[in-house]
Amino acid sequence: MIIRSLAARTCRALPRGSSLQPLRRFLSTDIDSIESSADNSFKQLGSLEAQLNAQVPQQVPSASSETQASSPAAQTSESVAEQYHLYKQQQQQLGHLGTEISQHYQPHTLLNNPPSAADVTLELLLASEAHQGHATSLWNPANARYIHGIRQGVHIISLEVTAAHLRRAAKVVQEVSKQGGMVLFVGTRDGQDRAVVRAAELARGYHLFERWIPGSITNGQQILGKCRMKVVNEKDEEIVGFEEQLDERSVLRPDLVVCLNPPENYVLLHECALNNIPTIGVIDTNADPTWVTYPIPANDDSIRCIQVIAGVLGRAGELGQKQRFDAAAKGVITYRPAKDLTMPEQDTSKDKAPKAKVDLSRTFMKDGGLEDADELEGKLDEANNREGSGRRIKVVA
Amino acid sequence: MAHREFSRGVRRAVDSLGNLPRSQCERTIRIARRSFHGSASRCVSTTTVRSAEFTSDTQEKFTAAPPIDFGKASGGKGGGKRLLQTLRVVPASPSYFSAKPTFTDDYISLTALLRRVATLPIIPTSEAPKVAWKTIDQYRIMTNEPVKTQRFHKMLHVLRRLNCIHPTLMPPEVMQAMQRYKKDVQPGDIKPAPGVIDEWGRAKGVGRRKTSSAVAWLVEGEGEALINGKSLAQFFGRLHDRESAVWALKATHRLDKYNVFGLVTGGGVTGQAEALTLAVAKALLVHEPALKPALRRGESVTANLLPFHPPSRLVSFPSEPHVRRPCFICSCRLTRGGGRIVVTSPA
């Protein structure tokens, strides 16, 4: 019995130890022998060289390793470039071989190819942790209607509500973009900058990923006074010649603000509320939903969730801009033009693009009527809206 | 016993083998049933819980703007007839609301560029080409924006990383992008014309110190010196001045190998002696350029024109005690009170 168990134990260990060790030994002796033979051949080569050099007046190029590495820096730099190109080539040829990994999370895809409002599914929101709220003790009771339940002491946001609110917000961004409004995307937390910039790029909007300077709306002339503005036509091409008028013009304000972290942007949202600027905000369970006009109940601590939301809103803005350009191509202006702009002098208009010049000559014939229209419009505005230029979306007379 | 163990193990292995395909099957079916986006399922949050950073009692209550009524707000029809009816005023940059649009655009474009070229091979920072980047003040003047120092350093960090790309693989667009942040004059751009030894074997050197200026000619010889037609001992009364006039030769042990002819004008005796130091050192460098490190160690080729510290500094700290400390401008051996730190002969 004892002998049998001993045999069973040792037999298992036997093939491992006994078979590999001699192999390794053979390998090492092999290498040694190869090295020694190489040394020998080098020595022979060296002696041959010496003999040859003694007989021939001209030096024979040596084959030894020391002389080959005469300019090591130049050679390595050459080889780095070569190796890199070789690596790239091989990656192109062989990169697609091997196992195919299907459907896995790649962090950059949410930035490179963000989902549109139609792609928003509960699975996407769940995967991006949009449902995770805060600890129940931190909650704001105003969010009760967005909360699905409690799990492990943490509020769980109802994803149906999130999806519905996100689609509504996307509609708002789309419509504002279609009507030529300025959409400002704000995300001032670490890691939100790329999502914010990408959304603004898609929606042709504006971005802010550092601190909101308090007073940028209520005291804008002091803070944004030096920032350059431009005059664009319906195709968003810059029209030159209005620089003098722009210098005297008051600073611009956003028409819609998308805030991805409302708790840290109290000042911004307060200024927007004071100036009647509608806001969209990602409302976690600890945030106050009354701070924003259109809340999106979701987890604002997850970068992935923020990327999904910013991407959806950016895509919506992209769609709205496309609708605006389509309408402009048909000659329909979907936005209210800027007030108080007068045509620059003829000599300055020579710098303009030829297309703009044609429009200009057409305009000058009707200049008299235009001023009246502007005045009337201004009076109507004052009556309707105490902010004047606060609301850009309005019927044009 | 071993046999029994073995058989049990075999049975377990067979069981697990039998189970494995079925479970994998089920998993694949479940994956297929899931929609396109539900591929990754994690239930544990990786982000830390952030505590609320606001307290409602201290903040003023406000009500957000009412929802937009898109029905009443629609664009004008057929407004494209006239140019003025089609114009909008918009910010020139998408970073308008950051109040630093140029800087923010620069930063975004640089980080985007770095993301594009991040996989290129790099060299260590010490081997990267030396670049003088614009200082924050120069950048502020260029952009006319109140850029914060910390943000500017973040941008410099990106620039230094771009500069570390392997020179053989440096993309031209990176070179072009970096050009904007470089100073107009880069180190190594200005190279002084090399000195020449004329037909009589003379090398000329010019030196200045305080208000003195000296011209020295150096020829190979036995160690004689003629300053304004006088010998060294006749011209300089102080031993110290005699030594400092030919300090460059002494520091490099060439005192008996060259003859010096010097012409000195202006200033006092000490200034003239120290102007000669620089003149002789420069002339010596024409004869033997390899002596430069030795002369640097001997501190005789550092031009030091300033008599004392700038007066403004003295005025702004009138009650500062008289402290012996090296000059903060060029770390030369002059100290605040005009005293000298004894220079030991170089190794």
Image (spheres, coloured by chain):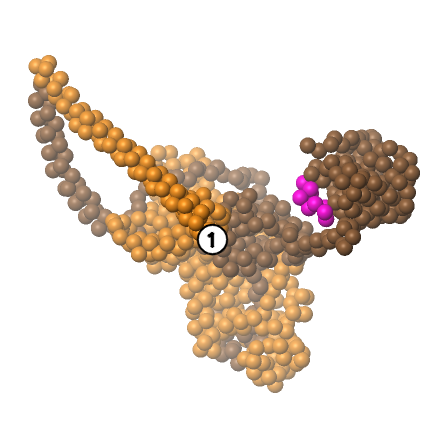
Chain colours: A orange, B brown
* Residue A124 inside the magenta-drawn segment: no
Q: Position of residue A142 (x, y in %)?
A: 44, 44
Please indicate whether residue A331 sits to the left or right of residue A127 in the image: right
| Three-letter residue code for mark 1 | Gln
Kindly give the residue lying farthest to the front in the view shown.
Answer: A55
Q: Which residue is mark 1?
A: A58
Please indicate whether residue A92 sits to the left or right of residue A314 in the image: left
Question: The residue marked by circle 1 belongs to what chain?
Answer: A
How crowded pointer 1 is (Cα within 10 Å; few <14, some 14-19, many 20+) is rated as few
User: Which corner quadrant of the image does residue B272 belong to?
Assistant: top right
Between A227 and B58, the residue placed more toward the observer is A227
At a point 91% along the width and 38% down the height, the residue shown is B234
Q: Position of residue A30 (x, y in %)?
A: 27, 35
Please determine whether, in this image, residue B282 is positioned above or below residue A322. Answer: above
At a point 12% along the width and 30% down the height, the residue shown is B12
Which stretch is magenta?
B285-293
Please determine whether, in this image, residue B325 is positioned above or below residue B98. Answer: above
Between B340 and A102, the residue placed more toward the observer is B340
Please determine whether, in this image, residue B86 is positioned above or below residue B210. Answer: below
Between A147 and A123, the residue placed more toward the observer is A123
